[in-house]
Amino acid sequence: MEKYQWEVTQEQMEVLKKLGIDNYPILDDKIRHSTGIKTKDFQVIQLGLSVSEEFFSQEIGNLPSLEILDINSNKLKSVPESIGNLLNLQELYFGYCKLESLPESIGNLKSLKLLDANGSRLTSLPESIGELKSLETLTLSNNRLTSLPESIGELKSLKNLNLSSNQLACENI
């Protein structure tokens, strides 16, 4: 495996707020421990093709300052309930993952304005989705949805809804 070299000072790492690692394997907590990154202070994380399921499930709920989480194009099959701890999260990107469902705790994300799960394998949505009162954009195209929860009608701030290329029948919308 190729070694990755960090060209920043310890002081820079301690105040890191944004992390983008696309197309590189994440070395789980080795990055955090070997560099001094204070993950709890992250505001933006972009981990396209990089995150392991173990790292995601163990660390995701411990990022209270996180505002944007982009894990598009990963092989994640599930989202831990601890994602509901991200009370400052405004944008969440799960596009092209292998997710079949979202946890009920997703409804705790009261600051969430954008949820993009385009091209995943979602077969259903939790009833708690209706609790996302700030949600403006919901992109669920190219999934396997056959119905929507009634609570989706509670999304009063919703401006953009994309449900194209699902298995929805008119009576289930």
Image: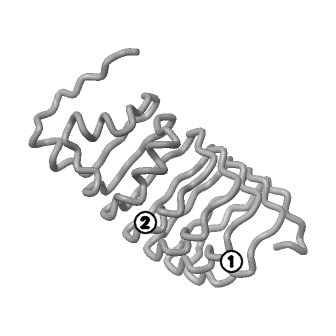
Q: Secondary structure at mark 2?
A: loop
Pointers 1 and 2 in contact (CB under 8 A)?
no
**Closer to the camera, 161 or 118?**
118
Q: Quadrant of the C terminus?
A: bottom right
Give the left or right position of residue 166, taking residue 112 as reference. Answer: right
Q: Earlier in the sequence, mark 1 or mark 2?
A: 2
What residue is at 49 percent from the left and 38 percent from the top? 52
Which label is found at residue 152? 1
Q: CA distance from mark 1 to mark 2?
A: 18 Å
Task: Name the amino acid type tagged 1.
Answer: Ile
**How would you rate the neighbour count of disc 1 (Cα within 10 Å): few for under 14, some for 14-19, many for 20 or more?**
some
What residue is at 80 percent from the left and 56 percent from the top? 166
Look at the picture and state if 69 lies above or below 153. Answer: above
Q: Secondary structure at mark 1?
A: helix
Residue 111: where, in percent of width, then height?
Answer: 43, 73
Report which quarter residue 72 is drawn in: top right
Which label is found at residue 90? 2
Residue 169: where, in percent of width, then height?
Answer: 89, 66
Residue 78: where, in percent of width, then height?
Answer: 61, 51
